[in-house]
Image: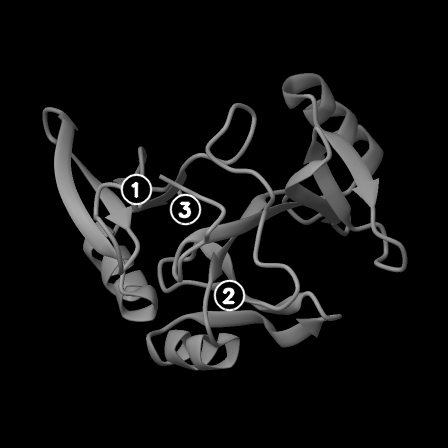
Amino acid sequence: MLTTDFPLGSPCWIDLGSPDIPATAAFYGRVFGWTFQEVPETGGYGFLQLDGRTVGALGHLDGGARSAWTTYFRTADVDATVKAAEQSGATVRVPPMDVMQEGRFAALTDPQGAEFAVWQAGNTVGLDAVSEDNTLVWSELHTRDQDGGFSFYHGLFGWRVENFEPSPGMNYRVISTAEGDQQQTSFGGIAPTMQPEQPSA
């Protein structure tokens, strides 16, 4: 289960790029009761909050780009993680950079084509609330290559895996952080894509 302790390798932040921030904020406000608090001098980036606690973030996306959520995984050293990811076949979309005093991040695309980001904590460790109603509770990777997907992230974060079959013929993999009780630290899964042409995400 996700907790706000955010052990290394766990999801610690999510954000969404949108070409229309007010419309997107209004949509999630209706669905989850989230409010949007813009951060000054960030070009429109701001926090999605529930009862005053940050549960995600929202930023501007240039027209024509596909709007999508990005999951950030906590690391002790962004630069070392990026180097290891590149050596394992990942592509760097945004090189390591500081976010004021809050932390350091980079954005990557894994060898299967799924986009993700990594976060090294400064003043901000992660979200204020998870595993509650209307907050982040689970993260999944959908990929045509489950073995390759797990191998890549295991190399970066030491993830552990437990296989099970939720329905006949479907192999689902529950993932956990490297340390702690494996079931208690599970936070997501790796599932096969539903269609052969479906991109990893």
Q: Nearer the viewer, mark 2 or mark 3?
A: 2
Residue at 33% of width from left, 65% of height from top? Answer: 157
* Residue in the foreground of this view, choosing between 113 and 87: 87
Q: SS at mark 2? A: strand
Find residue 26 and report its image quarter: top right
Residue at 30% of width from left, 40% of height from top? Answer: 196
Q: Is residue 14 above or below residue 98?
A: above
Q: Which mark is residue 108?
A: 2
**Lower sequence index among marks 1 and 3:** 1
Residue 51 visible (yes or no) = yes
Q: Nearer the viewer, mark 1 or mark 2?
A: 1
Residue 20 visible (yes or no) = no
Where residue 9 appears, as percent x and y from the top left, is 38, 60
Disc 2 residue type? Leu
- Residue that extends furthest to the left in the rendered view of this protein: 168
Find residue 169 and report its image quarter: top left
